[in-house]
Image: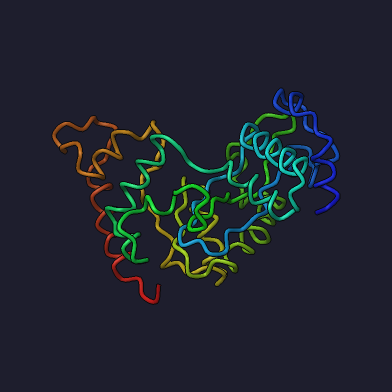
Amino acid sequence: MQTFIDAVRRVDLAAYRRGVTPSELTLSDGRDLFVSYAPFDHIARKAELVLVGLTPGRTQAANALEALQAQLNAGRDREEALAAAKSTASFSGSMRSSLIAMLDLVGVPQKFGRASAAAFFEAWSPLVHFTSMLRYPVYLAGGDNYSGVPAPLSHPVLRKMVETHLAEEAAALPSAIWVPLGGHAEAGLKHLADAGRLDSARILTGLPHPSGANAERIAYFLGRKPRAALSAKTNAERIDAARERLQRQVAGLAGL
């Protein structure tokens, strides 16, 4: 770990943002893709909610590297610096507001005695843990962001990341509610659940991804758009079934 922390101090951030990844940050290298270190190690061990994406992209990784450099240069110790760098992963804007509304609707905050999921996202809140199925950024051989091809669980290097790094987080947060954002993240959490390393009852599958591209699905899920006004691309029956299943699942959770 310290070797990579030292390497971060020397990273040319402008070059990194242009697509130049220093070899001294390489964790694993193959013909088709490679994994590079970025400071996403911190685990918020008091978190009640875990949000799981696919993998950090280059912009997110560069922001985290920049934050870690700044923290270390300011004299922060390693753990404080890593925690601050990880905070750059937080959701903001419409994505956050959509996610809060959907979590409120299915009853997640109430299970923890909170009035709204907004409590999870207060500044420097320890109540939410942001992570990825693949903790560290994965790039294609040419340096482009990896977007899920080949499928993570079909690739030995990527599957190992799930079974080590993501499994470590599952072990650290056994009482949290886990929300996968996208099909690959859902598959990764199911993989751990099938192996007995995560409670499947705590994985909330079926929430529309909170991106702007899903605006209509989110609006219908929240009851803000009537069924009669939906376009052909939105499957109302599927969304209704997911909403009802999630509400039953959350209501049935005990021991929080």
Q: Is residue 139 above or below residue 28?
A: above
- Quick check: 241 left or right of 30? left
- Horizontal side of 106 relative to 213 (left or right) equals left
At x 52% / y 70%, what residue is drawn?
174
What's the residue at 36%, 35% (across, down)?
Answer: 214
Image check: 25 left or right of 107?
right
Q: Nearer the viewer, residue 161 or 169?
A: 169
Question: Which image quadrant is residue 231 in?
Answer: top left
Residue sitting at 65 percent across and 35 percent down?
63
Image quadrant containing the C terminus: bottom left
| Picture layout, residue 207 above or below residue 48 | above
Here the colouring is: rainbow
Q: Residue furthest front?
A: 74
Q: Position of residue 82 (x, y in %)?
A: 69, 50
Residue 16 sits above or below residue 23 on the image:
above
Residue 123 in the image: state x and y as whole percent. 49, 47
Instruction: Pinpoint residue 45: horizontal percent, then vertical percent.
Output: 57, 64
